[in-house]
Amino acid sequence: MKLFLTSTCILALFCVFGQAGIQIKSGTHMVCNGNVRVSLPGDFMNNGAYTSSEERIYLSGTSKQQIGGTGSNSFFGMELNNPLGAFFTSDITITNELNLSNGILDLVDANLTLGASLTAVEGPLSLTNMVIASGAGEIRKRYTATPLSGNSDAFLFPLGTIGDQSEYSPVIMNFESANFGPQAYVSVQTINEKNPELGPEITSFIQRYWVVEPNDITDYNYEIKLYYTDDDVVTDGSVVEGDLVPVKYSNENWYIPQGASTGLPEVIEQGSSFSFASSNYMVWGGLTSFSQFGSVGGSFQPLPVELIAFQGECLDGLVTLNWSTASEFNSAYFDVEKSVNGIDWQIINSQIAALNSSSQIEYYFFDPNKSFGDVYYRLNQVDIDGASEYFGPVHLTCEDQNRVMMTFPNPSSGNFNVGIMDDRFIGDVNVKVADASGKVVGEKDCVLISGMNIVPCAGDILESGVYCIYITSDHHVEIVKHIISD
């Protein structure tokens, strides 16, 4: 016999007969319909079938509560408000909402899967309101194929451990890019022990490691933030907490951030990292592999600003610049400088930099002043200590569709004219005629005005051939070819 119950029936029937909680017997199918809060002072044991809707299971017992059973348990939402906590005895899925308002949720050996629609775990997350695994359980966060965009995809796993002391040590995952398959998720565990891949010769380390693994995810690049506590820090006195460097063991290889020195054998440098001892966390970006994370003592000189690209585009005389950084360390600001000759530079814009970052950052600048012909841009990146570094220059040639620079008639058998309409050549201009060998065979100084200017040239004294007409102002030179025929 199968029993189908609405959410209102759950409350009525099981508060009377179940008293402490809900038990679904084998062969029974419970269907929860509607948006309702199911207040549960006892256990939830499903040995039959349970169909979720938009219910929120509210765990409010006065003793430690159990959620499990042999059936499949998937809930729309769950809130833990029991200072004595709750524990799982089977795998649980929560698709949309999880609130840890009071109490510790122990996965034991079960896996907690959080749906793609669950964007954040709510509650005053702390060492009294967190998720632990007293066994081999792990949190799994699902992802969909929705395009990624910056920090909007960052997710905090509210993990911790209990023992002699409770320790809250969350992990924040932030994908910069990835391809997510239909079964995509990331699983995370934290273990309050020295990373087992570190040998006894490593005497300065964080006594905690994190196992982070992907499923059905390819072509990924991500940033991870790892939190620890002061009690996790173990040093032999030769280093201080600020010298600890994040490391990762994957496929029998050690990975370290670029610029780090750890003493580990045969390391692979990947991404960039920063350690913040005062706040007890490390952040490591530009990662393209997963597995076991830890930390060891070493020396670390973070790379300065690592520029990925600096480029520009000119459209009808208006220039747009963009540049991107893979990492930044103590970066204060960028000055954008401009030149029309590549020698004399002028600051035309300043932008605040990221200070410290291990993930890709995009910068943009639009030059509102029209530029025609050759134009140059460069970046001056300035650190908080005043040190600076130049990037570039970028050389652009901006064409003006309304500009005229020509000779006519061309070819000519005698005299010809040079037609000039170009605002870059207003004022004093020199016009030279040179033959194929570069010898100047004619020259004229003139003063040009805005609009079309006609400069006559004596061609009847020139031999047949190809000539170059050099038109020169204070900052610009243009060359026009002219043919003298028989």
Image (spheres, grey):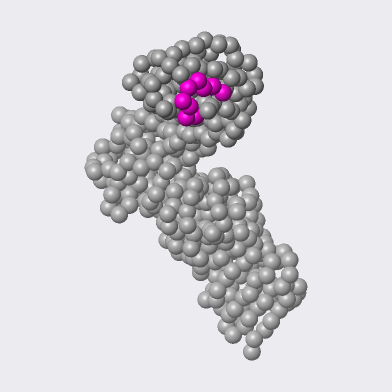
Left of 53 or right of it: where is 27? left
The front one of 199 and 287 is: 287
Query: Could you tell me which quadrant the C terminus lies in?
Result: top left
The front one of 267 and 239 is: 267
Q: Position of residue 198 (x, y in %)?
A: 29, 46
Left of 243 or right of it: where is 223? right
Question: Residue at the location (47% across, 33% down)?
Answer: 310
Question: Residue at the location (52% across, 26% down)?
Answer: 407
**What's drawn in magenta, residue-wise?**
410-419
Q: Position of residue 243 (x, y in %)?
A: 37, 31
Please say whether residue 417 is one of the residues in the magenta stretch.
Answer: yes
Question: What's the magenta bit mostly, secondary-structure-wise?
Answer: loop
Q: Residue furthest front?
A: 486
Question: Residue at the location (30% across, 34% down)?
Answer: 261
Query: Could you tell me which quadrant the N terminus lies in?
Result: bottom right
The front one of 80 and 355 is: 355
Q: Visible in this render: residue 254?
A: yes
